[in-house]
Image: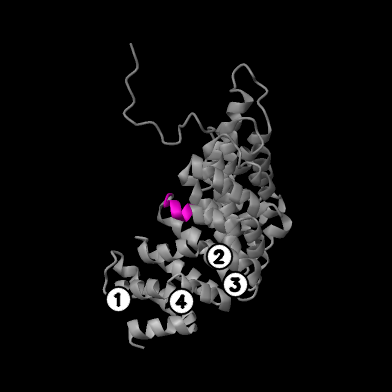
Amino acid sequence: MSPEPSAFPPHPYSDPARQPLAFGRRAIPKLVAECTTTSTNAATAPSPSDAKRRSLHSLTALLADPVAVAEALATPLISVANTELKCADATCRALAAEILDLITVHEAGTMQAIEHDSLAVLLSLINDTDATVRLHAYNVIANMTAWPHYAARFPLTHPSLITTLLTALTQEHKKSLAHLTPLLTALSQLLASTPGDATIALAAVHAKLIPTVTSLLVSGIGGTNARALAVSCIASVAVHAARTPDPVVPAVLGAAPALLSAAEHDPAASVRAAAARAIAGVAADVPAKRAVVKLGVAGVLVRVLAAEAHGAQRETAAAADVAAAVLSAVAVVGEEPEARAEFSEALGI
């Protein structure tokens, strides 16, 4: 007689891709240990590669819980993940990168990743053939640069960081648009980490950041976040124009036409506001101010301000942010007599 089918559905943790372990306080140490050992019963156990994948997969399920992350940081998990990032198996590399992605969201996780120099391993993955591996690697770098006091030191400890990220940005522009946002996020956070110090901005200018992100902005691909982050990168460099006019001003002026177009025509309020802030930043330098006035910046700012004031743009909820950014730009650009006359006539001031 055949057995009756069970009235209960399979338990959600009965996943053949995960290790059959109880979710108790010893689960994480056990899983970490499983990642570094192989089964001695080759006749009945899965291959070492399968066991490793199952353990790594189980860890990714557990680490969504912050309490589990705290437990994991008491184990050598980050060291294990760094090792697995070099594994020949793409699935193991992707799972190891995902583990670091989940851990570095927390500052304690970022601290440990810094101690184990995970960043150096992650930067070596920009040419990885697996898109998932690259995406998680970029996410981890974005997580780590989200902490300004750590991000400010990364270009010193890893001098090739900005160049490597820009290389990855150029490559992903042709491969996967989903990868652009974490790369631009990391670059934007690096540039914003030291607002009073131009060291990182100058390194970015020498690495051709401005033309790279400007081409991305002009192409219009990558979505609203990618365009806003691209403009934010330019704005973060532009704020140093008055202190270090050479080479910042020539680089940002090269992006000025794209910034003016974005400020006036981009459908996203976040992009328009960022473009206005970038214009205000570069116009802090007197020669640059005159240059952007000759490009017609006054007329652009007047039209954008009028459009926002009359609610002509779709994103009326964000119009105030755009208007504030434009007014800041008007205040800076208006120091030039030619622009001031145009503003006075158009705005009645």
- Disc on the earlier residue, 2 or 4: 2
Residue type, numbered disc 4: Ala
Image: 346 above or below 187: below
The label on residue 309 is: 1
Q: Is mark 4 on a helix, strand or loop?
A: helix
Q: Which residue sits at x=56%, y=39%?
A: 133
Q: Which residue sits at x=52%, y=72%?
A: 291
Alpha-carbon distance for marks 4 and 3? Answer: 14 Å
Residue type, numbered disc 1: Ala
The label on residue 329 is: 4
Local packing at callout 3 (Cα closer than 10 Å; few below 14, some 14-19, many 20+) is many
Alpha-carbon distance for marks 2 and 1? Answer: 28 Å
Image: 23 above or below 14: below
- Disc on the earlier residue, 4 or 3: 3
Q: Is mark 3 on a helix, strand or loop?
A: loop
Q: Which residue sits at x=49%, y=72%?
A: 292
Magenta: main secondary structure equals: helix
- Disc on the earlier residue, 3 or 1: 3
Report the residue that reaches farthest toward the top: 1
Tell me: 58 left or right of 42. left
- Disc on the earlier residue, 2 or 1: 2
Query: What segment is highlighted magenta in the picture?
Result: 216-221
**What residue is disc 3 on?**
241
- Disc on the earlier residue, 2 or 3: 3
**What residue is disc 2 on?**
252
Q: What element carries label 1?
A: helix
- Rendering coords of residue 18 (x, y %): 52, 33
Local packing at callout 2 (Cα closer than 10 Å; few below 14, some 14-19, many 20+) is many
- Residue 24 visible to the viewer: no
